[in-house]
Amino acid sequence: MARDRGTSDDYVRPIRRLFVGGIVVLMFALFLLWRIDSPRAERFRAMLIDRFVPSMDWALVPVSKFASMIEGFESYSRIYEQNQELRRELRQMRAWREAALQLEQENAKLLDLNKVRLDPALTFVTGVVLADSGSPFRQSVLLNVGARDGIRDGWATTDGLGLVGRISGVGQTTSRVILLTDPGSRIPVTIQPSGQRGVLAGDNAPIPPIEFIEDLERVRPGDRVVSSGDGGVFPAGLLVGQVVAGTDDRFRVRLSADYERLEFLRVLRSAPAERIELPGGLIGPGGAVIPDEMASGAVGDG
Amino acid sequence: MAEVVKPRIWRNRALYLGLAFLLVFERLLPLGELSGRLPGPDLILVLTYALALRRPDAVPTLLVAGVFLMTDVLFMRPLGLWTACVLLGLEFLRAREPISRDQPFLGEWTMVAGTILAVTVLNTGILSIFAVIRPTLGQILIQMIVTALVYPAIVVFCSGVLGIMKVSPGAVDPLGNRL
């Protein structure tokens, strides 16, 4: 028996179509709004996430803890070899520690003799990772610290050893960290020891490439990569990772931060770098330093 | 004698919403990074389309719009665009639900795969036009293929676990109305 289509829905169908069309148009309008006024839309998103995700905390935390426990349990099987290996490494580390202590003392003495002033040490806020980005195409994590704890957009985040990412999107109690591997992440870096500058550009791969290196000849796999502080967004000298040669003939960076185990992250409080605005004053006849504006004002008066 | 099917609209809607929440929850779990691995299937999308061809009234437009807008917000996607594309695909499938009742499974699968392709192409095209940062074409292609391949598994899950099967031709509800 053939079904006769649309006898009963004759009067419903046009209304339905209008209704569905309306919703689709509304969604496109929302997209346009997002595209035009992105900062406001992202604030709205941060607010929604702030409302929604911490309420899932009670379930997220036990499940992720349980999963990491299972992971830990699997490694019990080779606990003996691990123990031996750790002992060996510990012995090596002791030797290194001794060397580092001596060097540190020597360094402090030399700095003192030369009256070198270093950056003040950065203070930090530690947060716990609440949730992943949830999308295979975006790399970010959500922390349980936010505007309430004084977190601001743009601050650097490390896992204690290496740079992890940058704060982007702050809610009242949560904030989002864009990881270095995210396609939207661009961080100015310096490659040591050659001092070459470059930009670490995330592209969804676990080892992001460095772009805009001036002199490729002077960069070698194994070189250290640290943040350069160019642009004044990031504090300089944070360890990022080591240069490796990618399969596509580009230099990439193996990140020092342990991206497999992002659990606690430090958000570094960084004061915005002071800017030097004036091009420099003139040195007047009396030996007094006259800033530009005053000098030009005097000429105008006379 | 025609087969009698209880509609159980609200049970199915609750099931859909619950499963969607579960899938979102699973994606949000902070279990190591996802980068570098092959992108997995978009299970919420497949579930929505599978239900649209079985119980269209379990996936009302407003509910689906709500669920996908929530994922847009949580997964850092551009707000609203993916939702709009998915809704267009949903309406296409919903309109073809009566036809698909007496279609073999392979035909249904092809239709759904085509819809997923169209929805993905539309989404990617608009993202490119508006110059939004988007994943590479290779990644999008892989995710699309994986999503289309996982459809039979979701269909088996629907009939086996949820007990939601395709409406057979000529099925009626307890009051004797044709479904």
Image (cartoon, rainbow, N blue to C red):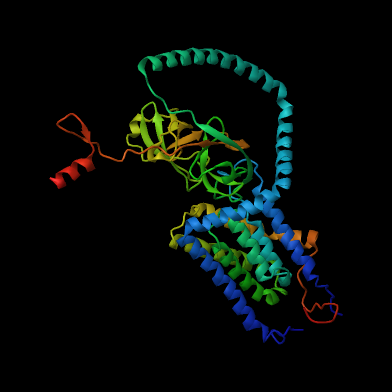
Quadrant (top left, top right, bottom left, bottom right) of the N terminus of chain B: bottom right
In the rendered image, residue A202, in percent from the top left (x then y), is placed at: 47, 44
Q: Quadrant of residue B148?
A: bottom right
Establish if B130 lies above or below A189.
below
Identity of the residue drawn at 64% across and 53% down: A51
Query: Could one spot residue B153 in this view of the protein?
Result: no
Quadrant (top left, top right, bottom left, bottom right) of the C terminus of chain B: bottom right
Between A43 and A294, which is closer to the camera in this rendering? Answer: A294
Query: Could one spot residue A195 in this view of the protein?
Result: yes
Q: Quadrant of residue B7?
A: bottom right
Establish if A16 lies above or below A82.
below
Between B172 and A149, which is closer to the camera in this rendering? Answer: A149
In the rendered image, residue A33, in percent from the top left (x then y), is placed at: 49, 64
Residue at the front extreme?
Answer: A301
In the rendered image, residue A180, in percent from the top left (x then y), is placed at: 50, 41
In the rendered image, residue B93, in percent from the top left (x then y), is placed at: 64, 71
Q: Horizontally, is A251 left or right of A285 in the view?
A: right
Identity of the residue drawn at 74% across and 66% down: B13
Q: How many marks?
A: 0
Q: Quadrant of residue A160?
A: top right
Between A131 and B168, which is closer to the camera in this rendering? Answer: A131
